[in-house]
Amino acid sequence: MGGERVPDAVSTLSPTSPPRGAERLGGSWCRSASRRLDETQKQKEEEERRKREEEARREEAAAERQRKQEEKAKREAEEAAKKQRKPGQKRKGLGGLSPEKKRLLKQLIMQKAADEMKAEMKKRQEEKDNYLRSRVQPLQLDGLDDSALAKKVRELHARVAQLEGEKYDWEVKLRRQDIEINELTMKVNDVKGKFVKPVLKKVSKTESQLARIEKKEKTLASFRTQLKSTGQNKFALEEKDEASHKVDFRDQLKPAGEGDALKEAAEE
C-alpha cells in the first residue's frame, strides 16, 4: 500500500464507462455523472476566466510601462533640445520640433489612438457579456430526473420559438418603417420638384470696377467736347448747279429767224 496510488472516485467514474453495479443504480449514476461534468466544466471556465484576467492585467501593466518610458523619453528629448538651443534663438518650424521629436510625437499619438480603440472594444465586449449574462440564465440541472430534463428541454424549445417570433416581428417592423421612409421621401421630392434648382452664381462687381468704368466714360465724353469745329465738313460731297451748266439742244435745232423772234418777244 505504500507505493500504490488509490484512484479517486472522479477518475474511476466516467460518463462513457459506467462502474460496476451501475445497472442497479439507474438514473442516480447518470445524475452524479452529469454533476461531475458540470463541476469540471465550471472549473475549466473559472480557470479560463482567471487566465484572461491575468493576461489583461499583464497587458495593462505593459502598456503602462511603455507609456511611462515614452513620457520619460519625451521629457529627455525636450531637455536635450533646450540645452542645445542657444539663448535668444527663435524656435523654427512647427513649434521647433526636430525630425526625431516629430517621429516620437507621431508614435505617441498613434499609441494613444490604439489604446483608446482597444479600451473601447474591451468596454463593448464587457457590455455585451453583461447583457448576455443578464438575459441568459444559467441552467440548473443538478438533481433532475429524466422527466424533469425532458420538461426543461421543452421549456427551452418554447423559449427559442418565442424569441424567433419576436425577432421576425422586429424584422417586419423595420422593413415596414423603411418602406414608409421611402414613400415619405418620394412625396417630399414630388412637392419640391424632381430636380433641385441649381444655385445661380452672382457676378460680383466691386466698387473699384464700377468706378473705373465710370471714369473711362467721363474721359471719352470730355474728349468729345474738347474737339474744335471748323464749320466745314471735310467729308461732305460737293453739289454743283447742274441746271446752269445744262445745254439745251432744242435751241440749236430751231431756225435762226424763229429764234430771233422769240428773243425779241421775250425782251418786249
Image: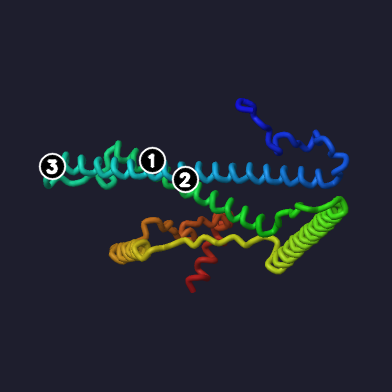
Quarter-of-image position of residue 132: bottom right
Mark sitting on residue 57? 2
Locate residue 224: give its quadrant.
bottom left
Q: How many C-alpha atoms fall within 10 Å of the one at disc 1: few (<14), some, or many (≥20)?
A: few
Mark 2 vs mark 3: which is more N-terminal?
A: 2
Answer yes or no: is residue 82 visible: yes
Helix, strand or loop at label 2? It is helix
What secondary structure is marked by label 3? loop
Query: In the rendered image of this protein, does residue 9 appear above or below residue 253?
Result: above
What's the residue type where badge 2 is placed?
A: Arg
Outermost bottom residue: 268
- Left/right of residue 155 with respect to residue 241 in the rendered view: right
Query: Mark 2 or 1 closer to N-term?
Result: 2
Number of callouts: 3
Task: Check disc 3 and give the amino acid type.
Answer: Lys
Disc 1: which residue: 107
Q: Is residue 93 placed above or below 5 in the rendered structure? A: below
Give the left or right position of residue 259, taking residue 179 as reference.
Answer: left
Instruction: Please give the name of the residue rendered at 40% of the width and 56% of the height, measured from the top-left corner.
Output: 235
Viewer-side label of 2, 1: 2
Tell me the distance, in whole angstroms, between the alpha carbons under discs 3 and 1: 28 Å
Q: CA distance from mark 2 to mark 1?
A: 23 Å
Which residue is located at x 64 percent, y 57 percent?
131
